[in-house]
Image (tube, helix red, strand yellow):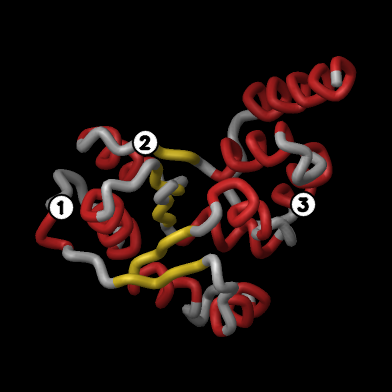
Amino acid sequence: MTIVSDTTPIRYLVEIGEVHVLEALFGGVIIPQAVCAELQGSRTPQQVRMWIQSPPPWLAVKSADISLFTPKAKIEDGEREAIALALEMQADALLCDDGKAIKEANRVNLPVLRLFNILQIAADNDLLDLPDAIDRVRHTTFRMPSDEIVNAMLERDRKRKEDG
């Protein structure tokens, strides 16, 4: 499975101590140079900067051929390179939470998984405790989905545990 990621999913999984789920779910993740640079940025939390300075073996950093993708909307360099790299590598999915970048990925028929999709899949595979992970995300700067979406996820998780 080929998975390319933008900055946000990796950053927040590192912040909440659950980045290991990416290897468990996907085997490996590829990021473009711009995402690697963003993860080292001065406004990025120190624990994330430290993590990317000694990345795990399952994380690969590759150069993106940005000529493969011209966005119709203004998006950041990390998102642009991630979409270009995903197209170049014929990725199975792009990990991304930026609304404009997701619209661009959808426009070029690239499947997208958001942070909360990843958390849900990880919980379904017993890789993390969903209520605890969501609580830890709430204590970050991540822009949370609506209460309706979060409550529905938690209810599905509760039912899965009851039926399990």
Residue 155 showing in the rendered view: yes
Q: How many marks?
A: 3
Image quadrant containing the C terminus: top right
Q: Give the structural element (helix, strand or loop) at label 1.
A: loop
Q: Distance between the residues labelled 3 and 1?
A: 35 Å
Rendered image: mark on residue 124: none
Dot in front, 3 or 1: 1
Are the residues tagged 3 and 2 within 8 Å (C-beta)? Answer: no
| Residue that appears at 76% across and 27% down | 154
Q: Where is residue 117 in the image (x, y as percent from the top left)?
A: 57, 36
Q: Give the structural element (helix, strand or loop) at label 2.
A: loop
Q: Does residue 13 appear to the left or right of 104 in the view shown?
A: right
Q: Which amino acid does label 2 sit on?
A: Pro
Q: Position of residue 57 (x, y in %)?
A: 56, 73
Q: Quadrant of the rendered structure where residue 79 is? A: bottom left
Q: Label 2 belongs to which residue?
A: 111
Q: Which amino acid does label 3 sit on?
A: Arg
Q: How far apart are marks 2 and 1 (CA)?
A: 15 Å
Q: Quadrant of the rendered structure where residue 112 is? A: top left
Q: Does residue 153 appear to the left or right of 63 in the view shown?
A: right
Residue closest to the far right: 162
Tell me which label, 2 or 1, sits earlier in the chain. 1
Depth check: give the residue in front, 6 or 55.
55
Q: Give the structural element (helix, strand or loop) at label 3.
A: helix
Q: Label 1 belongs to which residue?
A: 69
Depth check: give the residue in front, 150 or 27.
27
Q: Distance between the residues labelled 3 and 2?
A: 26 Å
Depth check: give the residue in front, 153 or 148.
153
| Residue that appears at 83% across and 44% down | 132
Circle 2 packing at 10 Å, graded few (<14), some (14-19), many (20+), is some
Tell me which label, 3 or 2, sits earlier in the chain. 2
